[in-house]
Image: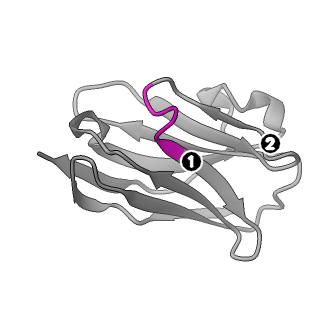
């Protein structure tokens, strides 16, 4: 199983970015894919999660209403559309996968990880 994150970059506050997590070797069924982030000097934070079976989503309070996570079955990717970006969204973002999906809220249960992609929001 491989996860490959992409799409990070430099954006001004208020702007948008779309991250993509390409998933290979994993059947989406009965799994959850999540985006996490870690800013310098801060703990890992779960940002958004999607359950493959029913597209249920969960967002952290810090991004709710601004970020949208979705599965593109045609491309086998899990995308994170980030709108209205704030300075505090600056972090390394990375994706993870867990099966079964009932462990979606427990970071330590995640089985597979992608590498990080840097998102920098400037003023």
Instruction: Name the residue furthest bottom.
Output: 74
> Is residue 64 left or right of 10 when viewed as pictured?
right
Task: Say if 47 sits above or below 21 in the image.
Answer: above
Tell us which disc is closer to us: 2 or 1.
1
* Residue identified by numbered label 1: 68
Please, what secondary structure does the residue beneath circle 1 have? strand
Judge by depth and name the residue closer to the eye, 42 or 87. Answer: 87
Q: Residue 26 carries which label?
A: none
Residue beneath disc 2: 99
Most frequent secondary structure within the magenta stretch? loop
Would residue 81 be found to the left or right of residue 98 on screen?
left
In the image, residue 39 sits, relative to residue 16, either above or below, namely: above
- Secondary element under disc 2, as helix, strand or loop, is loop
Query: Which range is magenta?
Result: 62-67
Residue 45 in the magenta stretch? The answer is: no
Compare marks 2 and 1 and give the one earlier in the sequence. 1
Locate residue 54, reporting x and y percent: 86, 45
Residue at left offset 42%, top offset 30% = 44
Image coordinates of residue 67 in percent, x first then y, are 50, 44
Which residue occupies the foreground of this view, 107 or 47? 47
Binning the other alpha carbons within 10 Å of mark 1 as few (below 14), some (14 to 19) or many (20 upward) gives: many
Q: Quadrant of the N terminus?
A: bottom right
């Amino acid at each position: 199983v491989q996860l490959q994150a992409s799409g990070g970059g430099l954006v001004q506050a208020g702007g948008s970015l779309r991250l993509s997590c390409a998933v290979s070797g994993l059947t989406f069924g009965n799994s959850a894919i999540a985006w996490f982030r870690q800013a310098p000097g801060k703990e890992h934070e779960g940002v958004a999660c999607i359950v493959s079976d029913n597209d249920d989503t969960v967002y952290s309070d810090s991004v709710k209403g601004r970020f949208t996570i979705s599965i593109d079955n045609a491309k086998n990717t899990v995308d994170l559309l980030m709108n209205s970006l704030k300075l505090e969204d600056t972090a390394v973002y990375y994706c993870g996968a867990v099966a079964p999906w009932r462990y979606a809220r427990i970071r330590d249960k995640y089985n597979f990880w992608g590498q990080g992609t840097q998102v920098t929001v400037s003023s």
